[in-house]
Image (cartoon, rainbow, N blue to C red):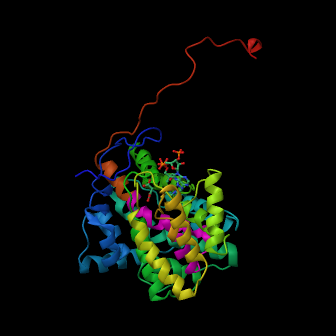
Amino acid sequence: MTDTTAKPLSGAGLRGQSAGETALCTVGKTGAGLTYRGYDVKELADKTQFEEVAYLLLYGKLPNRTELAAYIKRLKGLRGLPDALKAVLEQIPADAHPMDVLRTGCSMLGNLETEHSFDDQLNHIDRMLAVFPSIINYWYRFSHHGERIDTLAPEVDSIGGHFLALLHGKKPSELHERVMNVSLILYAEHEFNASTFAARVCASTLSDVHSAVTAAIGTLRGPLHGGANEAAMAMIQQWKSPDEAEEAILGMLARKDKIMGFGHAIYRTHDPRNDIIKLWSEKLAAEVGDTVLYPVSVRCEEVMWREKKLFCNADFFHASAYHFMGIPTPLFTPIFVCSRVSGWTAHIMEQRANNRIIRPSADYTGPENRPVPALDERA
Ligand SMILES: CC(=O)SCCNC(=O)CCNC(=O)[C@H](O)C(C)(C)COP(=O)(O)OP(=O)(O)OC[C@H]1O[C@@H](n2cnc3c(N)ncnc32)[C@H](O)[C@@H]1OP(=O)(O)O
Ligand SMILES: O=C([O-])CC(=O)C(=O)O
Protein backbone atom coordinates (compact mmCIF):
# COMPACT_ATOMS: atom_id res chain seq x y z
CA MET A 1 0.00 0.00 0.00
CA THR A 2 1.24 3.52 -0.74
CA ASP A 3 1.56 6.07 2.04
CA THR A 4 -0.88 8.86 1.27
CA THR A 5 1.06 11.20 3.57
CA ALA A 6 4.35 10.45 1.84
CA LYS A 7 6.28 13.51 0.80
CA PRO A 8 6.07 14.37 -2.92
CA LEU A 9 9.60 13.78 -4.06
CA SER A 10 11.26 15.47 -6.99
CA GLY A 11 14.26 17.46 -8.04
CA ALA A 12 17.85 17.50 -6.88
CA GLY A 13 19.51 15.13 -4.44
CA LEU A 14 18.20 12.04 -6.30
CA ARG A 15 14.97 12.62 -4.37
CA GLY A 16 12.18 10.27 -5.34
CA GLN A 17 14.33 8.01 -7.46
CA SER A 18 14.71 4.41 -6.48
CA ALA A 19 18.40 3.55 -6.39
CA GLY A 20 18.03 -0.17 -5.76
CA GLU A 21 16.24 -2.81 -3.70
CA THR A 22 16.47 -3.66 -0.03
CA ALA A 23 14.86 -6.22 2.25
CA LEU A 24 16.15 -4.45 5.35
CA CYS A 25 13.95 -1.47 6.00
CA THR A 26 10.93 0.62 5.04
CA VAL A 27 10.73 4.35 5.75
CA GLY A 28 7.41 6.21 5.67
CA LYS A 29 5.08 3.44 4.49
CA THR A 30 1.45 3.37 5.67
CA GLY A 31 0.84 1.87 9.09
CA ALA A 32 4.53 1.26 9.55
CA GLY A 33 6.47 4.48 9.78
CA LEU A 34 9.74 2.64 10.13
CA THR A 35 10.28 -1.09 9.98
CA TYR A 36 13.38 -3.28 10.17
CA ARG A 37 12.85 -6.52 8.25
CA GLY A 38 9.10 -6.05 8.75
CA TYR A 39 9.15 -5.27 12.48
CA ASP A 40 7.91 -1.85 13.61
CA VAL A 41 10.69 0.14 15.26
CA LYS A 42 8.32 1.14 18.07
CA GLU A 43 7.75 -2.47 19.01
CA LEU A 44 11.45 -3.25 18.71
CA ALA A 45 12.32 -0.28 20.97
CA ASP A 46 9.73 -1.50 23.47
CA LYS A 47 10.48 -5.21 23.54
CA THR A 48 14.03 -5.85 22.45
CA GLN A 49 17.58 -4.83 23.16
CA PHE A 50 19.95 -3.41 20.57
CA GLU A 51 21.94 -6.65 20.19
CA GLU A 52 18.74 -8.41 19.06
CA VAL A 53 18.16 -5.70 16.44
CA ALA A 54 21.76 -5.89 15.21
CA TYR A 55 21.39 -9.68 14.97
CA LEU A 56 18.11 -9.24 13.07
CA LEU A 57 19.73 -6.91 10.55
CA LEU A 58 22.93 -8.90 10.14
CA TYR A 59 21.78 -12.51 10.49
CA GLY A 60 18.27 -12.13 9.04
CA LYS A 61 16.13 -13.19 12.03
CA LEU A 62 15.49 -12.23 15.63
CA PRO A 63 17.70 -14.43 17.81
CA ASN A 64 16.15 -16.93 20.21
CA ARG A 65 17.27 -16.87 23.85
CA THR A 66 20.25 -19.18 23.27
CA GLU A 67 21.39 -17.34 20.15
CA LEU A 68 21.13 -13.97 21.89
CA ALA A 69 23.16 -15.09 24.89
CA ALA A 70 25.83 -16.48 22.57
CA TYR A 71 25.84 -13.30 20.47
CA ILE A 72 26.22 -11.01 23.48
CA LYS A 73 29.04 -13.20 24.80
CA ARG A 74 30.73 -13.12 21.42
CA LEU A 75 30.49 -9.32 21.11
CA LYS A 76 31.78 -8.85 24.66
CA GLY A 77 34.86 -10.85 23.71
CA LEU A 78 35.57 -8.51 20.79
CA ARG A 79 35.92 -5.25 22.74
CA GLY A 80 39.71 -5.20 23.10
CA LEU A 81 41.94 -2.77 21.20
CA PRO A 82 45.16 -3.87 19.46
CA ASP A 83 48.24 -2.00 20.75
CA ALA A 84 48.92 -0.51 17.31
CA LEU A 85 45.43 1.00 17.25
CA LYS A 86 45.86 2.42 20.76
CA ALA A 87 49.15 3.99 19.64
CA VAL A 88 47.39 5.70 16.72
CA LEU A 89 44.54 6.93 18.92
CA GLU A 90 47.03 8.38 21.37
CA GLN A 91 48.46 10.55 18.55
CA ILE A 92 45.14 12.24 17.82
CA PRO A 93 44.81 15.63 19.56
CA ALA A 94 42.12 16.38 22.13
CA ASP A 95 40.55 19.03 19.90
CA ALA A 96 40.01 16.61 16.99
CA HIS A 97 36.38 15.90 16.20
CA PRO A 98 35.41 12.49 17.59
CA MET A 99 33.86 11.57 14.22
CA ASP A 100 37.29 12.05 12.65
CA VAL A 101 38.72 9.84 15.39
CA LEU A 102 36.24 7.08 14.62
CA ARG A 103 36.86 7.42 10.89
CA THR A 104 40.60 7.01 11.49
CA GLY A 105 40.01 4.25 14.05
CA CYS A 106 37.91 2.27 11.58
CA SER A 107 40.43 2.79 8.82
CA MET A 108 43.34 1.73 11.04
CA LEU A 109 41.44 -1.37 12.11
CA GLY A 110 41.19 -2.22 8.42
CA ASN A 111 44.99 -2.12 8.21
CA LEU A 112 45.46 -4.35 11.23
CA GLU A 113 42.59 -6.78 10.66
CA THR A 114 42.15 -6.59 6.90
CA GLU A 115 39.16 -8.28 5.28
CA HIS A 116 40.92 -10.61 2.85
CA SER A 117 37.81 -12.56 1.89
CA PHE A 118 34.10 -11.72 1.84
CA ASP A 119 33.58 -15.11 3.53
CA ASP A 120 34.88 -13.40 6.68
CA GLN A 121 32.61 -10.37 6.46
CA LEU A 122 30.46 -11.19 9.49
CA ASN A 123 33.51 -11.62 11.71
CA HIS A 124 34.76 -8.16 10.76
CA ILE A 125 31.28 -6.68 11.18
CA ASP A 126 30.77 -8.11 14.67
CA ARG A 127 34.21 -6.84 15.57
CA MET A 128 33.32 -3.29 14.46
CA LEU A 129 30.05 -3.41 16.38
CA ALA A 130 31.88 -4.44 19.54
CA VAL A 131 34.97 -2.27 19.25
CA PHE A 132 33.71 1.14 18.10
CA PRO A 133 32.67 2.21 21.65
CA SER A 134 36.16 1.16 22.79
CA ILE A 135 37.88 3.17 20.05
CA ILE A 136 36.06 6.42 20.72
CA ASN A 137 36.16 6.23 24.51
CA TYR A 138 39.80 5.10 24.65
CA TRP A 139 40.74 8.18 22.65
CA TYR A 140 38.42 10.46 24.64
CA ARG A 141 39.66 9.38 28.07
CA PHE A 142 43.32 9.44 26.95
CA SER A 143 43.21 12.80 25.17
CA HIS A 144 41.05 14.57 27.74
CA HIS A 145 42.14 12.95 31.01
CA GLY A 146 45.47 11.26 30.23
CA GLU A 147 44.02 7.84 31.19
CA ARG A 148 44.67 4.56 29.36
CA ILE A 149 41.42 2.68 30.00
CA ASP A 150 40.97 -1.08 29.84
CA THR A 151 38.17 -1.42 27.31
CA LEU A 152 37.53 -5.06 28.31
CA ALA A 153 37.09 -4.33 31.99
CA PRO A 154 33.55 -2.99 32.46
CA GLU A 155 31.23 -5.87 33.34
CA VAL A 156 28.36 -4.57 31.25
CA ASP A 157 26.70 -6.82 28.69
CA SER A 158 25.05 -4.29 26.40
CA ILE A 159 26.87 -2.17 23.82
CA GLY A 160 25.08 0.97 25.04
CA GLY A 161 25.95 0.23 28.66
CA HIS A 162 29.54 -0.53 27.67
CA PHE A 163 29.76 2.87 25.96
CA LEU A 164 28.59 4.70 29.11
CA ALA A 165 30.80 2.62 31.41
CA LEU A 166 33.88 3.43 29.33
CA LEU A 167 33.01 7.11 29.19
CA HIS A 168 32.15 7.63 32.86
CA GLY A 169 34.37 4.95 34.41
CA LYS A 170 31.48 3.31 36.23
CA LYS A 171 28.52 1.04 35.54
CA PRO A 172 25.56 3.03 34.21
CA SER A 173 22.22 3.13 36.01
CA GLU A 174 19.47 0.84 34.72
CA LEU A 175 17.63 3.86 33.31
CA HIS A 176 20.65 5.14 31.39
CA GLU A 177 21.48 1.71 29.99
CA ARG A 178 17.86 1.37 28.86
CA VAL A 179 17.87 4.78 27.15
CA MET A 180 21.11 3.96 25.33
CA ASN A 181 19.59 0.70 24.24
CA VAL A 182 16.50 2.42 22.84
CA SER A 183 18.63 5.09 21.19
CA LEU A 184 20.82 2.51 19.45
CA ILE A 185 17.70 0.69 18.21
CA LEU A 186 16.20 3.92 16.82
CA TYR A 187 19.40 4.83 15.01
CA ALA A 188 20.24 1.33 13.70
CA GLU A 189 18.87 1.44 10.18
CA HIS A 190 17.13 3.81 7.76
CA GLU A 191 17.06 2.48 4.18
CA PHE A 192 19.02 4.49 1.58
CA ASN A 193 20.00 7.48 3.72
CA ALA A 194 23.15 9.34 2.63
CA SER A 195 25.69 7.44 4.76
CA THR A 196 24.23 4.03 3.94
CA PHE A 197 24.19 4.91 0.28
CA ALA A 198 27.85 5.97 0.52
CA ALA A 199 28.63 2.58 2.08
CA ARG A 200 26.77 0.77 -0.70
CA VAL A 201 28.51 2.75 -3.44
CA CYS A 202 31.88 1.84 -1.94
CA ALA A 203 30.85 -1.81 -1.47
CA SER A 204 29.62 -1.97 -5.07
CA THR A 205 33.21 -1.57 -6.29
CA LEU A 206 33.98 -4.80 -4.35
CA SER A 207 36.08 -2.84 -1.88
CA ASP A 208 36.61 -4.08 1.68
CA VAL A 209 34.16 -3.61 4.55
CA HIS A 210 36.38 -1.17 6.50
CA SER A 211 36.62 1.14 3.48
CA ALA A 212 32.85 1.11 3.04
CA VAL A 213 32.23 1.86 6.73
CA THR A 214 34.90 4.58 6.73
CA ALA A 215 33.09 6.25 3.81
CA ALA A 216 29.83 6.00 5.73
CA ILE A 217 31.31 7.57 8.88
CA GLY A 218 32.56 10.54 6.87
CA THR A 219 29.13 10.92 5.31
CA LEU A 220 27.23 10.71 8.59
CA ARG A 221 29.42 13.42 10.11
CA GLY A 222 27.76 16.38 8.32
CA PRO A 223 25.13 18.53 10.10
CA LEU A 224 22.48 17.77 7.47
CA HIS A 225 22.70 14.10 8.48
CA GLY A 226 23.95 12.57 11.77
CA GLY A 227 25.80 15.70 12.85
CA ALA A 228 22.42 17.35 13.44
CA ASN A 229 22.15 15.97 17.00
CA GLU A 230 25.29 17.93 17.98
CA ALA A 231 24.17 21.04 16.09
CA ALA A 232 20.74 20.84 17.79
CA MET A 233 22.44 20.66 21.19
CA ALA A 234 24.60 23.69 20.45
CA MET A 235 21.45 25.57 19.49
CA ILE A 236 19.14 24.72 22.40
CA GLN A 237 21.90 25.19 24.96
CA GLN A 238 22.02 28.91 24.18
CA TRP A 239 18.53 29.55 25.47
CA LYS A 240 17.56 30.03 29.10
CA SER A 241 13.78 29.83 28.72
CA PRO A 242 11.12 28.67 26.25
CA ASP A 243 10.24 32.32 25.49
CA GLU A 244 13.85 33.12 24.63
CA ALA A 245 13.94 30.02 22.40
CA GLU A 246 10.75 31.03 20.62
CA GLU A 247 12.03 34.52 19.87
CA ALA A 248 15.34 33.18 18.59
CA ILE A 249 13.70 30.51 16.41
CA LEU A 250 11.39 33.10 14.86
CA GLY A 251 14.45 35.22 14.07
CA MET A 252 16.26 32.26 12.53
CA LEU A 253 13.26 31.41 10.40
CA ALA A 254 13.00 35.04 9.25
CA ARG A 255 16.66 34.85 8.20
CA LYS A 256 15.95 31.52 6.46
CA ASP A 257 18.46 29.70 8.66
CA LYS A 258 18.26 25.90 8.82
CA ILE A 259 17.05 24.71 12.22
CA MET A 260 19.01 21.57 13.03
CA GLY A 261 17.06 18.51 14.14
CA PHE A 262 13.99 19.45 12.07
CA GLY A 263 12.69 18.25 8.73
CA HIS A 264 13.43 15.11 6.79
CA ALA A 265 14.19 14.01 3.26
CA ILE A 266 11.49 11.29 3.27
CA TYR A 267 9.01 11.81 6.12
CA ARG A 268 6.57 14.63 5.57
CA THR A 269 4.71 15.17 8.82
CA HIS A 270 6.41 13.11 11.44
CA ASP A 271 9.49 11.03 12.26
CA PRO A 272 8.30 7.97 14.23
CA ARG A 273 11.57 7.86 16.17
CA ASN A 274 10.92 11.28 17.69
CA ASP A 275 7.93 10.22 19.85
CA ILE A 276 10.04 7.51 21.41
CA ILE A 277 13.21 9.43 22.19
CA LYS A 278 11.18 12.45 23.32
CA LEU A 279 9.51 10.35 26.02
CA TRP A 280 12.87 9.14 27.27
CA SER A 281 14.25 12.66 27.23
CA GLU A 282 11.32 13.74 29.40
CA LYS A 283 12.03 10.92 31.87
CA LEU A 284 15.70 11.89 32.03
CA ALA A 285 14.80 15.57 32.48
CA ALA A 286 12.74 14.58 35.54
CA GLU A 287 15.62 12.49 36.84
CA VAL A 288 18.13 15.35 36.68
CA GLY A 289 15.61 18.01 37.75
CA ASP A 290 15.91 19.91 34.45
CA THR A 291 13.59 22.90 34.13
CA VAL A 292 15.16 24.52 31.07
CA LEU A 293 16.48 22.27 28.32
CA TYR A 294 13.47 19.98 27.97
CA PRO A 295 10.87 22.81 28.05
CA VAL A 296 13.05 24.77 25.57
CA SER A 297 13.11 21.74 23.27
CA VAL A 298 9.34 21.29 23.50
CA ARG A 299 8.81 24.97 22.64
CA CYS A 300 11.10 24.67 19.61
CA GLU A 301 9.00 21.74 18.44
CA GLU A 302 5.75 23.71 18.88
CA VAL A 303 7.05 26.83 17.14
CA MET A 304 8.53 24.93 14.19
CA TRP A 305 5.27 23.07 13.61
CA ARG A 306 3.11 26.18 14.05
CA GLU A 307 5.25 28.36 11.78
CA LYS A 308 6.56 25.96 9.13
CA LYS A 309 4.89 22.58 9.60
CA LEU A 310 8.38 21.25 10.21
CA PHE A 311 8.70 18.44 12.76
CA CYS A 312 11.50 17.05 14.92
CA ASN A 313 13.52 14.30 13.29
CA ALA A 314 15.30 11.52 15.22
CA ASP A 315 18.14 13.85 16.15
CA PHE A 316 16.37 16.65 18.00
CA PHE A 317 15.37 15.05 21.31
CA HIS A 318 18.44 12.84 21.22
CA ALA A 319 20.39 16.02 21.99
CA SER A 320 18.75 16.65 25.38
CA ALA A 321 18.53 12.92 26.18
CA TYR A 322 22.27 12.40 25.70
CA HIS A 323 23.05 15.63 27.53
CA PHE A 324 21.02 14.53 30.57
CA MET A 325 23.13 11.34 30.71
CA GLY A 326 26.31 13.42 30.99
CA ILE A 327 27.51 12.66 27.47
CA PRO A 328 29.69 15.44 26.00
CA THR A 329 28.12 16.91 22.84
CA PRO A 330 30.96 15.95 20.43
CA LEU A 331 30.33 12.28 21.30
CA PHE A 332 26.69 12.38 20.16
CA THR A 333 27.27 11.52 16.49
CA PRO A 334 29.83 8.80 17.33
CA ILE A 335 27.06 7.04 19.31
CA PHE A 336 24.97 7.18 16.13
CA VAL A 337 27.91 5.42 14.38
CA CYS A 338 28.05 2.71 17.08
CA SER A 339 24.45 1.93 16.20
CA ARG A 340 24.25 2.58 12.44
CA VAL A 341 27.26 0.38 11.76
CA SER A 342 24.73 -2.46 12.06
CA GLY A 343 22.56 -1.01 9.28
CA TRP A 344 25.50 0.01 7.10
CA THR A 345 27.06 -3.42 7.22
CA ALA A 346 23.74 -5.20 6.62
CA HIS A 347 23.46 -3.06 3.46
CA ILE A 348 27.06 -3.82 2.47
CA MET A 349 26.29 -7.55 2.68
CA GLU A 350 23.05 -7.07 0.76
CA GLN A 351 24.87 -5.10 -1.94
CA ARG A 352 27.55 -7.78 -2.24
CA ALA A 353 24.97 -10.55 -2.50
CA ASN A 354 23.49 -9.03 -5.66
CA ASN A 355 26.07 -6.60 -6.92
CA ARG A 356 26.38 -4.31 -9.86
CA ILE A 357 28.69 -1.32 -9.60
CA ILE A 358 26.69 1.81 -8.69
CA ARG A 359 27.45 4.32 -11.36
CA PRO A 360 24.67 6.76 -12.32
CA SER A 361 24.84 9.30 -15.14
CA ALA A 362 24.85 13.08 -14.98
CA ASP A 363 23.05 15.73 -17.05
CA TYR A 364 25.85 17.78 -18.57
CA THR A 365 25.51 21.57 -18.11
CA GLY A 366 29.01 22.74 -19.19
CA PRO A 367 30.24 24.39 -22.43
CA GLU A 368 29.98 22.77 -25.87
CA ASN A 369 33.03 21.06 -27.35
CA ARG A 370 35.79 23.63 -28.05
CA PRO A 371 39.49 23.73 -29.01
CA VAL A 372 42.21 24.03 -26.34
CA PRO A 373 43.83 27.50 -26.69
CA ALA A 374 47.63 27.79 -26.61
CA LEU A 375 49.06 28.90 -23.23
CA ASP A 376 49.77 32.51 -24.40
CA GLU A 377 46.27 32.91 -25.85
CA ARG A 378 44.46 32.27 -22.56
CA ALA A 379 42.90 35.10 -20.53
C1 LIG B 1 19.19 11.20 11.26
C2 LIG B 1 19.12 12.21 10.16
O1 LIG B 1 19.99 12.30 9.34
S1 LIG B 1 17.71 13.16 10.10
C3 LIG B 1 18.19 14.64 9.28
C4 LIG B 1 19.10 15.45 10.17
N1 LIG B 1 19.36 16.75 9.57
C5 LIG B 1 18.90 17.90 10.10
O2 LIG B 1 18.19 17.93 11.09
C6 LIG B 1 19.29 19.17 9.39
C7 LIG B 1 18.12 20.13 9.20
N2 LIG B 1 17.21 19.61 8.19
C8 LIG B 1 17.48 19.78 6.87
O3 LIG B 1 18.46 20.39 6.48
C9 LIG B 1 16.54 19.15 5.87
O4 LIG B 1 15.24 19.05 6.41
C10 LIG B 1 17.01 17.74 5.42
C11 LIG B 1 18.46 17.80 4.95
C12 LIG B 1 16.90 16.74 6.55
C13 LIG B 1 16.11 17.28 4.29
O5 LIG B 1 16.34 18.11 3.19
P1 LIG B 1 15.30 18.24 2.01
O6 LIG B 1 14.70 16.92 1.69
O7 LIG B 1 15.99 18.96 0.92
O8 LIG B 1 14.21 19.19 2.68
P2 LIG B 1 12.77 19.58 2.12
O9 LIG B 1 12.65 19.26 0.67
O10 LIG B 1 11.74 18.99 3.04
O11 LIG B 1 12.75 21.14 2.31
C14 LIG B 1 11.53 21.84 2.07
C15 LIG B 1 11.69 23.26 2.51
O12 LIG B 1 11.78 23.30 3.94
C16 LIG B 1 12.95 23.94 4.34
N3 LIG B 1 13.50 23.23 5.47
C17 LIG B 1 13.67 21.90 5.56
N4 LIG B 1 14.22 21.61 6.74
C18 LIG B 1 14.39 22.78 7.39
C19 LIG B 1 14.93 23.11 8.63
N5 LIG B 1 15.42 22.17 9.44
N6 LIG B 1 14.96 24.41 8.99
C20 LIG B 1 14.48 25.36 8.19
N7 LIG B 1 13.95 25.10 6.96
C21 LIG B 1 13.93 23.81 6.58
C22 LIG B 1 13.89 23.82 3.16
O13 LIG B 1 14.87 24.83 3.18
C23 LIG B 1 12.95 23.93 2.00
O14 LIG B 1 12.64 25.29 1.79
P3 LIG B 1 12.59 25.87 0.31
O15 LIG B 1 11.49 25.10 -0.37
O16 LIG B 1 12.29 27.32 0.52
O17 LIG B 1 13.94 25.61 -0.27
O1 LIG C 1 16.93 8.77 6.08
C1 LIG C 1 17.58 9.83 6.07
O2 LIG C 1 17.72 10.54 5.06
C2 LIG C 1 18.23 10.33 7.28
C3 LIG C 1 17.82 9.62 8.53
O3 LIG C 1 16.81 9.91 9.13
C4 LIG C 1 18.66 8.52 8.98
O4 LIG C 1 19.62 8.14 8.31
O5 LIG C 1 18.37 7.98 10.06
Image height check: is 229 above or below 2? Answer: below
Where does residue 11 sit, x and y in percent of width and height?
45, 38
Percent coordinates x, y for residue 366 in the rendering: 56, 23
Q: Position of residue 68 (x, y in %)?
A: 29, 77
* Relative to 20, 196 lies left or right: right
In the image, which residues are magenta?
318-344
Q: Residue at x 39, y 58 (%)?
A: 190
Tell me: residue 225, above or below residue 232.
above
Which is more toward the observer, 219 or 159? 219
Q: Position of residue 194 (x, y in %)?
A: 46, 50
Please tell me which residue lies in front, 29 or 170. 29
Magenta stretch containing residue 71, yes or no?
no
How many numbered marks appear?
Answer: 0
Left or right of 96: which side holds 39? left
Residue 341 visible within the image: yes
The residue under the point 30% across, 73% down is: 43
Seen in the image, is 114 located left or right of residue 257?
left
Q: Quadrant of the C terminus?
A: top right
Instruction: Characterize the magenta stretch by its predominant secondary structure.
Output: helix
Q: Where is residue 76, by image quadrant?
A: bottom left
Does residue 162 lie above or below 203 as drawn?
A: below
| Residue 87 visible within the image | no
Q: Residue at x 40, y 55 (%)?
A: 267
Q: Quadrant of residue 19?
A: top left
* Residue drawn at 58 percent across, 61 percent down: 99
Whether residue 341 appears in magenta in the rendering, the answer is yes
